[in-house]
Amino acid sequence: AQSVTQPDIHITVSEGASLELRCNYSYGATPYLFWYVQSPGQGLQLLLKYFSGDTLVQGIKGFEAEFKRSQSSFNLRKPSVHWSDAAEYFCAVGPNAGNNRKLIWGLGTSLAVNP
Amino acid sequence: DAGVIQSPRHEVTEMGQEVTLRCKPISGHDYLFWYRQTMMRGLELLIYFNNNVPIDDSGMPEDRFSAKMPNASFSTLKIQPSEPRDSAVYFCASSRGTGRNQPQHFGDGTRLSIL
């Protein structure tokens, strides 16, 4: 069955520390992969996406993610976290063939940042 | 450019009442998605449209839920009659039709409370 797993429900880091949020997927073929961020009371905003090519992708707000096919993972990283990065982060996968446009979503990781 | 616009932002109503949520997608986007977000179930896709035609409504919980897209710039999600378990945040998202890797752009959501 297709699924996305974000193993960490909640993470707390200190401001200035590095961050890695994990995402593992189960899919029949190489999917398209997305990371979104949701601030309180707002909708989801795209951070970055991977669909082909270089497996290390850069996104907005200083985030990057690396696609590792052998591990079925697409982990999100940031070298130095800012207090404004406190939010909910969602990983999602979508099909790279056919007409289906449904995304499969992880349950999210809540990030808290200590001053 | 204007993003996805949802109204109302908040809705509080009593059980049994009809609820109508509205969405205006980004101009030029061919796909429109309705999601429901709860703490227990995360982000669930209810239905999505392509060129105003419903493509997949398998996520619609039951017959009390209906969605329409009468034109390219407007969609509604209706719940009749509403029940307390329908309380959630409902998001609308839209995306371009050219390529499966096109990201979904989310509105700020409607927070629905059924008393």
Image: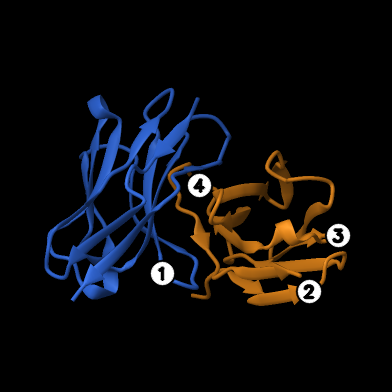
The subunit carrying tag 4 is: B
Cα separation between marks 4 and 2: 39 Å
The residue sitting at 74% across, 47% down in the picture is: B53
The subunit carrying tag 3 is: B
SS category of the residue bearing label 1: loop
**Which of labels 4 and 2 is toward the front?**
2
The residue sitting at 72% across, 52% down in the picture is: B52
- Circles 3 and 4 in contact, beta carbons < 8 Å: no
Residue linked to disc 1: A39
The answer to which image quadrant residue A62 occupies is bottom left
Residue linked to disc 2: B13
Q: Position of residue A27 (x, y in %)?
A: 42, 27
Q: Is residue A114 above or below residue A71?
A: below
* Of callouts 3 and 4, the N-terminal one: 3
The subunit carrying tag 1 is: A
Colour seen for chain B? orange
Chain coloured blue: A
Q: Are marks 2 and 3 on the same chain?
A: yes
Label 3 Cα crowd, 10 Å radius (few <14 / some 14-19 / many 20+): some
* Of callouts 2 and 3, the N-terminal one: 2
Q: Which mark is residue B68?
A: none
Cα separation between marks 1 and 4: 28 Å
Q: Position of residue B84 (x, y in %)?
A: 75, 61
Label 4 Cα crowd, 10 Å radius (few <14 / some 14-19 / many 20+): few
**Which of labels 1 and 2 is toward the front?**
2
| Residue B50 located left or right of residue A42 | right
Cα separation between marks 1 and 3: 30 Å
Residue linked to disc 4: B98
Q: Are marks 3 and 4 on the same chain?
A: yes
Residue linked to disc 3: B80
* Of callouts 4 and 2, the N-terminal one: 2
